[in-house]
Amino acid sequence: MRKNIVAGNWKMNNDLSKTAALLSDLKEQTKTSNAEVMIAPTFTNLWHAFEATRHDDIEVIAQNMHFAENGAYTGEVNASMLKSIGIQTVILGHSERRAYYNETDESLAKKVDTALANDMRIIFCFGEELADRKSGNEETIVENQIKKALFHLEASAFKNIVLAYEPVWAIGTGETASPEQAQDMHAFIRKTLEGKYGHTVADDMTILYGGSVKPGNAKEIFSKPDVDGGLIGGAALNAENFYAIVNAF
Ligand code: PGA
């Protein structure tokens, strides 16, 4: 079933005391929309955030995880560690992970398998770079990212996957894809899914847009028929702005 979701990716921001302060600001906000609300604090604050929001309508999710179940991977975090503190959902494939930590379609396919094997929900991110869009290759790039990381899966796996289209040129730049550009790409993504898995999987898929979503542009972007929500970076670091986006539905 397609849902509306607004997820805040806090990235490498907020130490423990700032996390606690932002959580208490978030708890004061009122949700007037039907969107599911998620926040992704950094690993060290996940347990605190999970405990602090236990009775609230906020799901705490992880920004990343390793593909191995266990082992000699210094500095890494695995699925069972996340699950053991109550985390059910993980963001995979964010463009910053792809760009700075060499995450590839192949390593992401392994992460996807591990997350699903551990009954986790995935927010799977992908999107083209500016040069790809300038040369008119954005659909080919996006299609390949989706195919290489996800098209080995059975149709039934997609009920645990949310897609997040995030054009790299719009992340943290203040430059947003126009609502029409977002809609065109989301419709293309749905068509790509339909080609492989049929109408029901495609129609049920929740597809988020990410890249400089703000209170001022969220309503117009979310009004597009194939845009089911947003993955929010900078604007998620302020409770009022974040809920203005949540309530833009
Ligand atoms: P932004 O980040 O909203 O700051 O552009 C979005 C993201 O990286 O998910």
Image: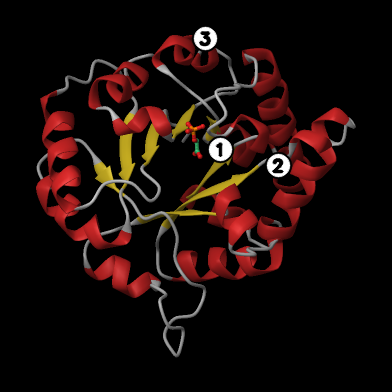
| Residue on which disc 1 sits | 205
Q: Residue at x 66, y 20 (%)?
A: 183
Q: Is 47 situated left or right of 76 in this image?
A: left
The answer as to whether callout 3 falls within 8 Å of ligand 1 is no
Above or below 198: residue 176: above
Residue type of the residue flagged with mark 3: Glu
| Residue on which disc 2 sits | 193
Residue type of the residue flagged with mark 2: Leu
Q: Nearer the viewer, mark 3 or mark 2?
A: 3
Q: Residue furthest bottom?
A: 72
Q: Residue at x 90, y 32 (%)?
A: 135
Is disc 2 in contact with disc 1, using a CB cutoff of under 8 Å?
Answer: yes
Where is residue 134 shown, x and y percent of the image?
Answer: 85, 29
Residue type of the residue flagged with mark 1: Met
Q: Determine crowd level at label 2: few under 14, some 14-19, many 20+ residues with C-alpha closer than 10 A.
A: many
Q: 123 and 18: which one is in front?
A: 18
Separation (CA) of disc 3 from disc 2: 25 Å
Where is residue 88 shown, x and y percent of the image?
Answer: 33, 57
Q: Determine crowd level at label 1: few under 14, some 14-19, many 20+ residues with C-alpha closer than 10 A.
A: many
Mark with earlier residue (2, 1): 2
